[in-house]
Structures are given as structure tokens and as C-alpha cells.
Image (tube, rainbow, N blue to C red):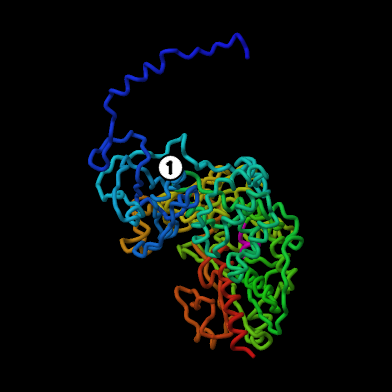
Amino acid sequence: MNNNSTMPKKDFFAPIKAWKFLFKKPVTIKVPYVKREAAERYRGFHINDWEKCIGCGTCAKICPTDAIRMVEVEDLPHEYGKKSQRPVIDYGRCSFCAMCVDICTTGSLKMTREYVHVSPDPEDFIYAPTEKGIHGIENIPVGWTKDENSDLLELDRVEMEMIEGEERSKSFIEYVKGYSKEQAMHEAARCVECGICTDRCPQHMRIPEYIKAIWKDDLKEAVNILLKGDLEQDMLGANPFSSVCGRVCTHKCEEACSIGNRGDAIAIRWLKRYIVDNISSYENVVNYKIEPRNKKVAIVGSGPAGLSAAYFLATMGYEVEVFESLSRPGGVMRYGIPSYRLPDEALDKDIAFIQALGVKIHVGVSVGKDIPLMELKEKFDAVYVSTGFTLGRSTNIPGTEHEDVIQALPLLREIRDFLRGEGPKPKIPKSLVVIGGGNVAMDVARSMARLQMMEYGKVDVKVSSLERTYEEMPADMEEIEEGSEEGVKFYPGWGPIKVVIENGKVKGVEFKKCLEVFDENRRFNPKFDENQKMILEADMVVEAIGQAPDYNYLPEELKEKLEFVRGRIVTNEYRQTPIKWLFAGGDIVHGPDIIHGVADGYWAAKGIDEYLRNEVK
């Protein structure tokens, strides 16, 4: 032992000093007859604000003693972003560690200073906490709540690196750089695996599972989850356009993300992109055992709905042929989305895997012109139409008949063909007005801003919309923000009156102030201030106020048997029309949305399979 030790020596009289406690009255708490106020941060019985609680189940997953279980509550309405469940706590198991409170995604769960509960019935110690606590008391003193030191959630998203606005407006190079391995794993670690995102996704993708595979650094498992979904549920959740959706999905799943209640939602879209961008070829890691069936299916249109149906039908063993009127497959993904958001290489990767399963794609074949629809019916056992919205809508204001007033979709197609070297340079105006406030309007504005920068070295693009604020505009906020960074000017709250034409040339558009877009019944019924007007100068105008379907390929005798609601074909849940052999999906059933198109393709494939198994011999 070190002789220089500074430890104090034990006092010889210490035992004698302790004797004084023999004569001191002890503090006795007689439960429940004597109540002693608990400390301010006491971990007592729980309370839960049911209005805030979303039933994510994170509290139950983290509980180290398995004291919490989630129970369905029948009276709770089904809402996207919420589950109709609430936690039930067994205080026979609870260790009062407060981890459930520290990880609560909404902050609804707290602990009180209540600690006394006496009952001979063990069932009385199992209850679903509400704001009134275990004793049904109003305004219970709150004890333990999470703070910045105890919070178990990481609320800040790993930011995606992008090319800066001024620089990216000089070219059509994809401006989102993608996550590195370290960034993706860090972002994946934020996920609490609640699965609410899966419920919100139209295709019910297995989002928590593929995010967890990223966290485990197992991209082979991740891409199999993306492309195969849940094999026990007939591939529910599979997405053959994961490379596409990893870039341009409307990502409604992120709106439902439980982490988004208190912080930034998980970057689900970018994590999906990370997986596919780091797998060189799907064929090397995704394998199918396909048993051929002696049945053939024709698909009209090669957009997301058509090619998704082809994918699922091919995995079932059917012979599938797709008919596309344009020179390349992909539909709106190929011709409607600018290359700075969705490069051809990403789309080609998804389509190549679909073709590798045996799907035949015929391009430059227009059904209704080159081959009648009824001829397909004779050659194939079933037909699925997914022809998309190919026609533009016009405001029909005076002047829209001018050659320099054009529709959005043909212009976007012209720009894509030009950039591929497959078409002439489109007319590039020195000044452009885009009428419309949706994502298609943003695509036109941002594409033309790039062409103007490349041609003239400056941007003069103006976007007007009836919607009075950026929040009211149907375009994604990120599209508006990024467009602004690229030089696009926005004029929300203005309705067009006429295209101004002088000496046979477009000079601009006259507008009047929009006061309301919808009436009290949420019907489109705009109201204007006729005395408040302005003119936006331009030498070209693009109308981007919506798209419409073209049903010219449908014979009249078939149209008479179909049901249409607001221009869309009505089908059953398996996308089957009243004509048993004819199925429909995509824009012409549910409106424009890629992930919805994928879901339509999935359910149509199941419906076609059911039809061919049971009704076609």
C-alpha cells in the first residue's frame, strides 16, 4: 500500500455517534392514508393526450419490461398519419424508467406525480392512460417529461446535397446529388419503424423494412424488399419503379412520418434512391422462379401503371406485350418529367429489369390507329389500358388560339426529345408566362429557365396561378422554392383575362386579382376583383392548368358499356371495368401520380390473374 495515501482514517467514535438515531422518531408513510407530495420530476403513473397520440407504438417497442401493448380502439376514426390504437400499460411490469416518454414521437405521453394506487384486483393496474390518468382526475400534476437531454429521437434530417440554384439553372444535369453511405445510414437510424408511412403509401411499400436494411448495410436485402415486397402477401408493397420513385415520388409517406410530428420527417424518398443507385444491376441480386402460364395479356400504354402491371403479370408467368405510341417507353416518366429531376438512365434501369422478365414492348405503335383495340382483344386473353392524360386543358381566354400559346405536355416532350438529340430545338422565348400553379407548371418554368440561361444568359420566366398563396398552390413547396432559386418569378392570386397580341405577336397576358378559388362547399368557383388588373409581358405563353385523357382508341360500342366520372373510367378494386376482359388504371382511373399508377398496376395484375384463372379456359 502507498504510505502517502490521503484517505481519511475511520473515526473511533463513529459507532457511538450512530446510537443517537435509536431515539429519533422514524418517518413513516401509511399508504394510502398519508400522502406525501412527489418531487417535480417524479416518474409516477402515465397520462396520454389522445388528441396528440397517433398510435405509432414506439413506446411499446422500446419498453424494456414489455409493460406496454397497443390496443385497437374501435371508436377512433381512420386518418392518414395515425393508427386507431392507443397504449395500454401494465404496472405489474412497468419499471417507471420513462423511456416510453423519452421516445414518444408526438410528446403525448407523460408521467405524473401520482404514485399511489391501491386495489385488490390486479386488473386495476392495467389501463390505457388518458389525460385524466389512472384515477380519472382533471389537471394532474405532471412529473417526468422529455427534455433536450432525455429525448431519444433525432429530429433533424440529414440534409441532401444539391447543386446551388444559380449553377444548376445553367444545365439539365441532375441537381440532387444523393446520399453517401454514411449519410444514408445516419438518416436510416432515425426511423422508429412505426409503419404509419406504409399505410399512407398507395402501394403500401415496406418502408421500415428497407430502411432497416440500409441501417444494417445490407443493400441486397433492401433492393429485394423494394422489388418483391411482401411475398407472403403476393408481393404487396413491391415497386418496380423504385429508381424513378426514389427521385420524383410525391412521397406522401413522408407527410405521415411520425418523426415529422416534432421534427423533420425521415427522408424516405432519398433513402429509396440510395438503395437503387448503389446496386449496379437488379438482375444480379433479385431472382424469380417463374412458372409459365399459357395466357397472354396486352397492355396499352407504357407509363408507370402499364409497365407495373406488366412487371407483376410477368412474375406470375403470363406473356405480356406492351403497346406504346411514342418512340420510347415510359410515358409521363420519359416525356413529362424534366431530365434534371429524372434522368433517362434512372428510368432505363427500371424498365430494363421489367424487360428482363420477358415483357415485350412495342414502341411507335398507336392502338386505335395502327392496331384496333378489338384486334388486341382477339389476340390476347385480357387487355389493360393505361393511356394516361395526354391532352392539355385550355383557359380558352381570348388569344389562346395564337401559335405562341402552347400546352405544357407537348412542350415538355419537345424539350426532352431535343436534349436527347432526337428532335429540333424548341422555340426559346426571351420572356415566358406560365399559367398554372401545379407541378407541371413548375416543370415547364424550370425547364424553360434553363434553356433561356443556355441561350441568352438570363432568365425571364413568370408563373401565375389562381391560388393566392404558395401554400394554396398545388405544386410541391420544394418545387416553388427551387424554381425561385433558379430565377423564376411567381405571381400567385391572379386569373388570366386575355392574351395580349399586338401586330400579330404575343406581348403578354392580362390578369385580374383572384379573391377566392373555392366556395364554401369547396367547389371550384373563383371570384375576382375586376378593378385590380395587371399585365405580365411575354412573347410566349404556356398553359399548364391540367390534363385530360384521350379515349379515341376506344370503339363507341365499348364506351357505351363503360362508366365515366369526371372523365375517368370507373373500375372495381381490381381495376376491372364492366367489360370483363378490359381492365384500366393509372391517370385515367385515379389521376396523375406515379406511385398511384404503380399501385393500379399491382391490383390490375391481381384482377387479371383472377379473371384468367377462373373465367378464361
| Quadrant (top left/top right/bottom left/bottom right) for the N terminus | top right
| Most foreground residue, 159 or 56 | 56
| Most foreground residue, 580 or 342 | 580
| Quadrant (top left/top right/bottom left/bottom right) for the C terminus | bottom right
Left or right, residue 156 beside residue 97: right
Amino acid found under the numbered disc labelled 1: Ala
> Looking at the image, which residue sits at the far top?
4
Magenta segment boundaries in residue numbering: 332-337
Left or right, residue 235 beside residue 75: right
Residue 357 is situated, as x and y percent measured from the top left of the image, at: 73, 71
Left or right, residue 543 beside residue 47: right
Q: Which type of secondary structure does the marked residue at label 1 adopt?
A: loop
User: Does the magenta portion include 405?
Assistant: no
| Most foreground residue, 114 or 205 | 114
Residue 459, above or below 369? above
Q: Residue at x 45, y 75 (%)?
A: 565
Query: Would you name the residue on which mark 1 appears?
Result: 98
User: Does the magenta portion include 336?
Assistant: yes
Residue 72 appears in the figure: yes
Residue 434, above or below 617? above
| Most foreground residue, 392 or 587 | 587
Label total for image: 1
Residue 525 appears in the figure: no
Residue 153, above or below 445? above
Residue 479 is situated, as x and y percent measured from the top left of the image, at: 54, 50
